[in-house]
Image: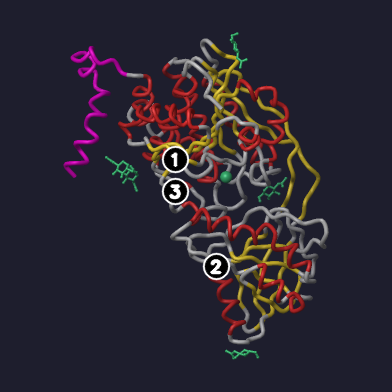
Amino acid sequence: MLLYLFLILPVISVTSRSWNIHDRSVPKTISDRLIELATQGAFRGVTYYRLAALADTIGPRLCGNESLTQAVDWIRNAMTSEGLENVHVEQVQIPHWVRGEERVQLIQPRYAKLSMLGLGNSVGTGSKGIQAPVLVVRSFDELNVRCEEARNKIVVFNPQCDWKAQPIDCYGVVVAYRSGGASQAAKCGALASLSRSAASHSIDSPHTGVMTYDSSYPKIPAASLSVEHADMLERFQQRNQSIEILLYMEAQTLPDVTGYNLVAEIKGSILPNETVLVSGHLDSWDVGQGAMDDGGGAMISWTVLSLLHYLNIRAKRTIRCVLWSCEEFGGIGADQYFLAHEDEVPSMSIVMESDMGVFHPLGLEFQGNDKAQQIIQTISQQLISINATQVIPGGGGTDIRPWQLRGVPGASLYNDNWNYFAYHHSNGDTMNVLNSTDVDLAAAAWAVYAYAIADLDDLLPR
Ligand SMILES: *[C@@H]1O[C@H](CO)[C@@H](O)[C@H](O)[C@H]1NC(C)=O
Ligand SMILES: *[C@@H]1O[C@H](CO)[C@@H](O)[C@H](O)[C@H]1NC(C)=O
Ligand SMILES: *[C@@H]1O[C@H](CO)[C@@H](O)[C@H](O)[C@H]1NC(C)=O
Ligand SMILES: *[C@@H]1O[C@H](CO)[C@@H](O)[C@H](O)[C@H]1NC(C)=O
Ligand SMILES: *[C@@H]1O[C@H](CO)[C@@H](O)[C@H](O)[C@H]1NC(C)=O
Ligand SMILES: [Zn+2]
């Protein structure tokens, strides 16, 4: 406890007026002022408050749903009244998938309702549903071996992975079945595909997400099952008990609708033609509140501009906040943004996206060449007071990827997100996952990195 006080007190003392009067010889850096404002000053708790107001009032923001447009309008109005610059939306075409009613009922060996969520892009089952025996497999290899057995059945993919050791790697392994399982099952003549949720931890929580169809095979319905229920089905099979399931899904894809990427800026003082882009996506899945994925990332990106505006500080370059539309169906809004702004590749210093949580910040995940990496390392020293100085390789994000592929350096928030995949794409993604103090620290770290990069003498080398 003493140690804790010792570490925190100097930061608090910076905020007191007497400290300024007695110690004029040590002017505060802009980074210190940003950190102080976000964590102790007028903006303390503001990012969490804004996000809670949005998540509670508007709720989740599925691509194509009116709630996503409401969220854009709400933030756009708030940004405009706040006095941010160049606040505007850019139109994009986005898919409109609707879930409708859905259920999975176990018929044999006993009746039970199973915990499920249909997957984005999936077709529905028709009004009678699909009742069929089940084949459980752990991998595509096993499905290939048992391909004949899958005919006219519902295939259940139950991939295993050591989530505690390698959460991000496991996500990749398991998501392969969520995205591609239906077409692989259809190839063997299956009627529907159910896949184990991509979850690091589960209290019988199904986790949704997007899937895609391979056009060579018939489109069959696809849903996720909770980890517990996928394992139970596998145990029935191991005991040679025959399993029968009734799957009912009203899911359908309606014609594309207009969506909006939301943009605001703080123009550069010397090089307004050069840009640092900070971003998060405003759309979410239609379960939970889309608080962690990615309301938090969107909100801290907004806060970057709010802090600078409040302090009346401009970096040399423009800092642009973009809140993306329809990331969850595959970076749909961001891909169109890139096509419309491709001419900015030479003037984009870095593209930043926070989409892996706004938990306690540790530093920056960065992708760029060695020289740029060294510059970021130097900047990281401005975050010593909040201990967010680690610069590690990484820095990807669905929405910034097109820029990165063209050589623009990229970054994401490195944060203590070990529990991210417990909540991701589930009903558990609510405000309760987030901690207001940590969100403030995340916003502070995000702002200092963005500002310091925008205020360098040169564009980041690439
Ligand atoms: C938006 O989502 C709500 C809640 O799921 C649903 O009732 C409504 O029909 C959806 N609207 C559109 C246009 O998809
Ligand atoms: C299930 O059936 C297989 C194949 O007939 C047999 O090898 C296996 O021992 C059976 N398992 C149980 C638990 O009865
Ligand atoms: C931005 O404008 C400045 C001054 O006009 C110019 O020197 C610089 O090359 C421009 N940046 C880019 C990337 O074009
Ligand atoms: C700073 O972060 C590092 C790495 O996350 C951690 O090991 C260390 O204990 C932290 N220091 C303080 C003072 O919190
Ligand atoms: C929230 O985060 C702060 C700072 O990391 C921590 O001190 C506090 O205990 C956390 N609160 C909860 C409820 O976990
Ligand atoms: Zn996300």
The correct choice, above or below, for 394 with respect to 265 in the image is below
Quadrant location, the C terminus: top right
**Residue that carries the numbered disc 1 in the rendered image:** 392
* Range shown magenta: 1-28
Q: Which residue is mark 2?
A: 160
Q: Is residue 356 magenta?
A: no
Mark closer to the observer (2, 1): 1
Task: Characterize the magenta stretch by its predominant secondary structure.
Answer: helix
Q: Check contact, mark 3 vs mark 1: CB within 8 A.
A: no
Mark 1, secondary structure of its residue? strand
Ligand 4 near label 1 (Cβ, under 8 Å)?
Answer: no
Q: Residue most toward the left?
A: 2
Q: Give SS at disc 2.
A: loop
Q: Earlier in the sequence, mark 2 or mark 1?
A: 2
Q: Compare residues 209 and 404 and report the one nearer the observer.
A: 404
**Identity, as a three-letter code, of the amino acid under mark 2:** Gln
Amino acid on which the number 3 mark rests in the picture:
Asn
- The residue tagged 3 is 417
Say how the picture is coloured.
secondary structure
Residue at the spot x=56%, y=33% of the render? 279
Position of residue 290 relative to residue 247, above or below, is above
Q: Quadrant of residue 241?
A: bottom right
Q: Which amino acid type is marked by label 1?
A: Ile
Identified at 73% across, 50% down, the residue is 97
